[in-house]
Amino acid sequence: MSEVAEAQGHAFTLSGATLVARGTGALYWPAQSLLCVSDLHLGKSERLARRGGSALPPYETQDTLQRLEEEISALSPKVVICLGDSFDDAAAADALDEPALLWLQRLQAGRKWVWIEGNHDPGPVGLGGTHLAELTESPLTFRHIAEAGGSGEISGHYHPKAAIARTGGRARPCFLIDAARVIMPAFGTYTGGLRSQHAALSPLMEPRAIAVLTGPVARAIPMPR
Amino acid sequence: MRQLPQTFSDWFAGRGWQVHPHQLEMLARADDPALLLIAPTGGGKTLAGFLPTLIDLAEGEHKGLHTLYISPLKALAADIRRNLETPVEEMALPIRIEDRTGDTPSSRKRRQRVDPPHILLTTPESLALLMSYEDAPRMFAGLKRVVVDEIHALAESKRGDQLMLALARLERLCPGLRRVGLSATVEDPPALAQFLARHPDPCHILQADPGPAPDIQMLRSDTPPPWSGGGAAYAIADVLEEVKKHRITLIFHNTRAQAEIFFHNLWLANEDGLPIGIHHGSLDRTQRERVEKAMVQGRLRAVVCTGSLDLGIDWGDVDLVIQVGAPKNVKRLVQRIGRANHRYNAPSKALLVPANRFEVVECEAALEAVREADLDGDPRGPGPRDVLCQQILIAACAGPFAAEDLFDEVRTAGPYADLTRPEFDACLDYCATGGYALRAYDQWQRLKQAADGRWHLRDPRASQLIRMNIGTIQDTDTLKVRLKRGGGKPLGEVEESFAASLTPGDTFLIGGRIVRYESLREMTVEVSRDPGRKPKVAVFSGTKFATSTQLSQRVLRMFQQESWPELPRHTAEWLALQREVSRLPEPGRLLIESFPHDGRMHLCVYGFAGRNAMQTLGLLLSKRMEELGLAPLGFVSTDYATLIWGLEEVLDPTPLFDLEALREGLDGWLAGNAVMKRTFRGAATIAGLIQRNTPSARKSGRQATFSSDILYDTLLKYDPGHLLMDITRQEAMRGLVDFGRIEEMAARVAGRIDHLRLDRVSPLAAPLFMEIGKVPIEGEGSARLEAQEAERLMQEAGLV
């Protein structure tokens, strides 16, 4: 693949659908003009502060929306799917400030917008768009947590990360991809990652699974286990 | 003016002891508000500090806490308690002495708050915790004296700043408190006195007789040291011989990894089965205590150790100190040498063992400096503001406070004497609201102002989290190491990055034994015993000190000699060869060599600015090389030189060294740098933005870590003027970045750059190739290589 194409992302097929794992951490389905992002965790700093924890810098919602807007401007998708844990909890969704709400509305305007439920945000949020437990867009199914035996499945939840060991690089958020499923990296600014070696991830992925590292260039490597 | 009561002089006489003049002088000045005693170890320093207390308390009239003793080590607090109990019992004094550290059972801690002993021995962290309780005024009521032991060591870190803030608070609870500092030899006693005393109280400095000059030499071995590395394996046989000739030998190393390797090699060669132990900060506490106990009981002939034995416990019978590896700093060397022969008036005996050729030169320079009593050291900066932030939170835990009162109190602490009100207010604002430019939500507030203007915690339950995270000691991210079988016996800790580099089956050294990596579970590295195989080396590091400016300059001056009769022949010949094929670095010039090696172009810069500054220089130069399309791939730095390799040759290095350009590059680029992120992590933890310990983590045993790198990136983007960013920049410039020494170097060199293009590696540069700690550069060059590697992996796995 040429450098230019790589910069756009890593293209692959899942159940016959051609998808692109982008360096930004978003998944793009050109044939359906569909953009999928996972685990935005908007309002994370608000929730931590509210619970008497750290007073983290309150900029992650702004930063996450900024990067989402850049993806939407670059691709003009007809459909946007937020794959669960879009909000750190229901109260965090309620606590979004006016500028953030207007910003979300602006992003939603003129396209189909789907909120998939996550474990952090199980109930509906009053923020426009459709709210679903999961969504099937044949041949793919979008749900928050991967299910054993799923196929053509796009999920989030685990926020995997991985590194290219021999070059001594740092671990970066990554996609895990095999013939049956994609596990997406988190798109949220304050959302950390789980190393691909973790015991929770190995059983979900086939031996020949790959990891696509996010970054300026999306880089495919065999999934580190 | 006080004198020694009869009971006491009888007791001294009964033990056949002479009262030292400085002990009497300490007694005579017992009513001074502050006193600093500088005495060698073994000079009856501790007793000198406690005499006025024991005499006061001998009358039996004092109720409650009388004297607080602070030591940097828990073990030292316990040791001093045992030492004090001897005179107290023998003179039948009505005095209760207890220690209180993180290891004290909580039932006793509770009792101590209700019914404190006469003398309480504790650490800066335990004191800070005590000050955070609402009942602190009751507990400390009647306190007369504070003794700060090993104050020279405390003053070198933020623990000292925190302690001085705690003393400022104590002073308000107990007006008229007397302070005594006990210190080893330091280069600038008045600065230390100012640090200790309540500002602006005077502080008299007492210098005890330093005793006879130390007997210190370099090990002369028939085997020449290797070109690089820190193992000093070549000297094992000679060191063993020395151990046999002495009663107890302390063998100091600069890093834990080196101590481990040396200990391992020592055991392989220890045919007589001499009892030798190992002691360093990464070992499990029970293991360390076992070694300490064996030492006290005289069951060991030698201990291989690191800075963890720099302080404290009086081993008494140590008659030889061996320093393996370059001493880096003359003052610390002198203090280490002082660990031998604690008996007063006997010369300390020490041996320097250079680990490689370069260190032979540095050891010789250090010997000269010790003989001339030319101690080095950098002046202390102003009191760090992250520690102040923690102090404000601690004050809030103890109860509502008025900003003016707290500001006045803080300014009585020596390190904070010059703190301005705006600086203080910025810290208060950070504690109260997070200090963000975007001030949106009420729930970010940790402190609120009541109607009377006093500040208090918004949620009183927050005090638990604050108390759990008191302290300024920065651990690198470490993982515990346990044996997988045999009840999960804890062995010690390794750095997270080291653990991440292991694959099952790898072996490494810990606590002197070889273990095999089995798996990583939660935050624990599980290992099994693996006797008899060659270990993959553990790289968990102790503190890395930079070689001091004074010592570096001495080395440069030595290079200018015509010949080096004082150096072993192998080293003298090496320097002569360098002079022949290239040049030796000179004090007022900068030597740069470039040469091809192994298919890459190399640039070697002999800056002599100390490890941290050379590291920064490596980062800055490689950044400029990247901009110039020279595709640098990585670099490695030592205290003396930086070696950069890349795909293209540097034809003219002069433009790379333009100081203005370097400084500009520093601001823009440094921002995204790992060193800054590491510094930020420290400041953010101390100031309470992120917590190392949380109640839920304590329950689950899992560490709650939030990536401080992400917070740093976020603040850099949205709030670069935030207090913590400001603190980070200020600290990095002094500490890990050490740009000051780059500027110093640039001034020294003043454009006099000698660039030599060689066709091969020079003798002086060769050892750099074997240095560990190579820094890869993420740029065009690495992207090219990374793409190749990703491709190779995919092909190998048959995935393309």
Image: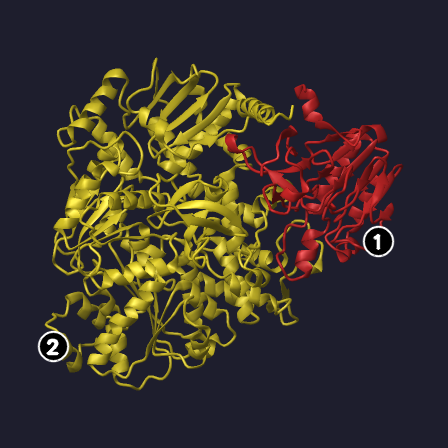
Q: Nearer the viewer, residue A156 or B91?
A: A156
For chain A, what colour was chosen? red
Task: State the mark number for residue B14.
Answer: 2
- Considering the image in quadrants, where does the C terminus of chain A appear? top right
Q: Quadrant of residue B547?
A: top left
Chain B, colour shown: yellow
Q: State the separation of the CA atoms marked 1 and 2.
A: 84 Å
Q: Which residue is mark 1?
A: A124
Residue B149: give x, y in percent of width and height. 31, 63
Q: Nearer the viewer, residue B442 or B426?
A: B442
Q: Name the mark nearer the viewer: 1 or 2.
A: 1
- In the displayed structure, does residue B628 sit left or right of residue A208? left
Q: Quarter of the image for the N terminus of chain A: give it.
A: top right
Residue B29 visible (yes or no): yes
Question: Callout 1: few (<14), some (14-19), or many (20+) C-alpha neighbours within 10 Å?
Answer: some
- Which residue type does callout 2 highlight? Gly
